Image (cartoon, rainbow, N blue to C red):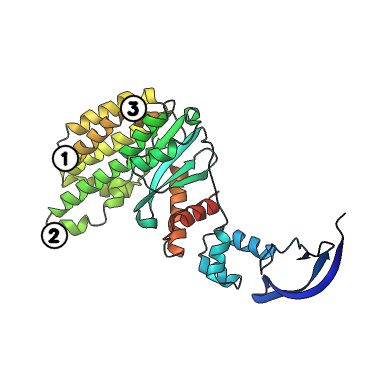
Amino acid sequence: MLQKKIHDYRAQRIKDVPIQMKNTFLIIRKRRYVCDCGKRFYEKLDFLPRYHRMTSRLVCSIIKELEQNYSMKSVAKRLNVSTNTVQRVFDYVSYSLNNLPEAISIDEFKGNSDGVKYHCSIVDPINHKVLDIVKDRKFSCLSAYFKAFNNRDKVKYFICDMYRPFVDIAKTYFKNAKIVIDKYHFVRYNNWAIENVRKRVQKNMPIHLRKYYKRSRKLILARKDNLNEESKQQLEVKLLYSEDLRQVHYLKELFYKVTEAKSSNEARPLLKKWIDIAKSSGLKEYISIANTYSNWFNEILNSFDVTYTNGCTEGFNNKIKVLKRNAFGFRNFERFRNRILHCCR
């Protein structure tokens, strides 16, 4: 049986969670024991990890504070520790993903960590949580990441935008998944086309008309059914000056009827008809997006049958932007990745 006798005592000052924003220290009188074999050792304290000079409670407070979008510097100031201490504590935090869920949503965001311009977020659109962050949006990087998973065949839905490497990844590694182009992204192409036509027409107008059209963006983009009588009259006057704007308005209203379809079977003839009209409109802006919609026809139609979208992914990307802005950027990708997962789970 191990015999322990008190050999001596040692006073140790330990940092604890601040009280009223004031530094708090615990003075602990630690006992040192001596074994029958002659070995000496200190007693174990549940609230003080070995070789640490701060309590477990303070460590947990640092980790808890970092769940918010605060910078490490602001957390350090709030808890009266150094920024390096916060970084060292957080570097023990690590997240991993072992299995993929039934549906995954993927989108890129601007990062700049480790010299890579765009990182990639992988989100569970059903449970609304970030699954992982991939260092690069390139096919080679995504391929190396996804081929490590064994349950790829269980993924039923792959939601993304019209970025070709994303779709190539889905076709290569997710054979059983339905590829869905997020509705927000393909509707945005139509809005961009309206804006480009409006700017082109406005640029060629006389100065007095150009000033009159200067604040016409919202009026032209708005659905006619949502306008009051006064706004409808203003819209009619603005459309009188340009045939191109009249065509744009017609195509816009027709396109919104396509988006109101309840299923892919209902949307298929409507979208096909809209593409044909857009191609014959003579407007280069609409001919371009009509060709884009033709190239992604089936993937766009899938969005009418699948209710999952990239909405929560875009929301997380906005949160990531705030996190990055508060921290004035992250140079270390692994720390950036763990911080995102820590804040967005």
Residue 185 in the image: state x and y as whole percent: 35, 41
**At numbered mark 3, what does the secondary structure look like: helix, strand or loop?**
helix
Name the outermost residue toward the front.
Answer: 37
Residue at horizontal 15%, vertical 54%?
A: 203
Q: Is residue 336 left or right of residue 246?
A: right
- First of labels 3, 2 by sequence position: 2
From the image, tell me which residue sits under label 3: 298
Asked whether the residues under the numbered discs 3 and 2 touch, taking CB atoms below 8 Å apart as contact, a structural biologist would say no
**At numbered mark 2, what does the secondary structure look like: helix, strand or loop?**
helix
Residue 181 in the image: state x and y as whole percent: 37, 35
- Find residue 240 and report its image quarter: top left
Mark 1, other Cα within 10 Å: few <14 / some 14–19 / many ≥20? some
Q: Nearer the viewer, residue 200 or 70?
A: 70
For marks 3 and 1, give the one nearer the viewer.
3
Relative to 67, does residue 120 appear above or below in the rendering?
above
Q: CA distance from mark 1 to mark 2?
A: 25 Å
Q: Nearer the viewer, residue 310 or 62?
A: 62
Residue at horizontal 35%, vertical 34%?
A: 167
- Find residue 63 and report its image quarter: bottom right
From the image, tell me which residue sits under label 1: 284
On the question of residue 304 being in view, the answer is no
For marks 3 and 2, give the one nearer the viewer.
3
Question: Please, what is the three-letter code of the amino acid marked with disc 3?
Answer: Asn
Q: CA distance from mark 3 to mark 1?
A: 23 Å
Q: Is residue 294 left or right of residue 327?
A: left
Question: Please, what is the three-letter code of the amino acid marked with disc 1?
Answer: Lys
Asked whether the residues under the numbered discs 3 and 1 touch, taking CB atoms below 8 Å apart as contact, a structural biologist would say no
* Residue 207 numbered mark, or none: 2
Residue 304 in the image: state x and y as whole percent: 41, 30
Asked whether the residues under the numbered discs 1 and 2 touch, taking CB atoms below 8 Å apart as contact, a structural biologist would say no
Q: Is residue 220 left or right of residue 331?
A: left
